[in-house]
Image: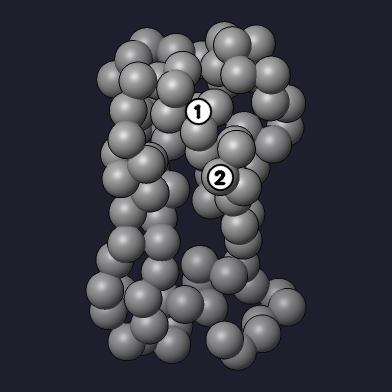
């Protein structure tokens, strides 16, 4: 990936075109369950800051243990949280 220090990674990907990306849909799943970041944080033991970064797609990776904790609490599948998009 080309590094654009002034712009977010999402902006760089959109400008390059033809590149695929993974979109985090945690906010949508949380809204469906009517759960706040604080409630999810308390239930999973993950920090609100890390959950907020994940929710706003400001992460480059996610540990399986983190994904497992989130999916267990939200009673969902990883595919409900992560979406792979072709050719943005």
Task: Give the residue at x 46% y 17%.
Answer: 73
Residue 64 is labelled as: 2
Q: Which mark is residue 70?
A: 1
Q: Quadrant of the N terminus?
A: bottom right
Q: Residues within 10 Å of mark 1 (few under 14, many from 20)?
A: many
Q: Residues within 10 Å of mark 2 (few under 14, many from 20)?
A: few
User: Residue at the spot x=41%, y=76% of the render?
Assistant: 14
State the residue in front, 15 or 59. 59
Task: Say above or below: 18 vs 30.
Answer: below
Query: Residue 18: where, in percent of width, then height?
Result: 32, 87
Residue found 60% across the figure and 89% down from its top: 2
Looking at the image, how many numbered discs can be counted on the residues? 2
Q: In which image quadrant can residue 40 be found?
A: top right
Identify the residue shown where x is 34% and y is 15%.
33
Q: Is residue 52 visible?
A: no
Label 2, label 1: how many angstroms apart (C-alpha)?
Answer: 10 Å
Residue 11 position in % (x across, y down): 51, 71
- Discs 2/1, front: 2
């Amino acid at each position: 990936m080309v590094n654009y220090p002034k712009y977010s990674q999402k902006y760089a990907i959109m400008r390059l075109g033809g590149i695929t990306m993974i979109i985090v849909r945690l906010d949508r799943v949380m809204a469906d369950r009517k759960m706040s970041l604080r409630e999810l944080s308390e239930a999973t033991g993950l920090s609100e800051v890390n959950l907020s970064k994940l929710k706003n797609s400001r992460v480059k990776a996610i540990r399986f243990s983190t994904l497992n904790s989130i999916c267990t609490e939200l009673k969902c599948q990883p595919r409900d949280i992560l979406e792979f998009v072709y050719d943005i």
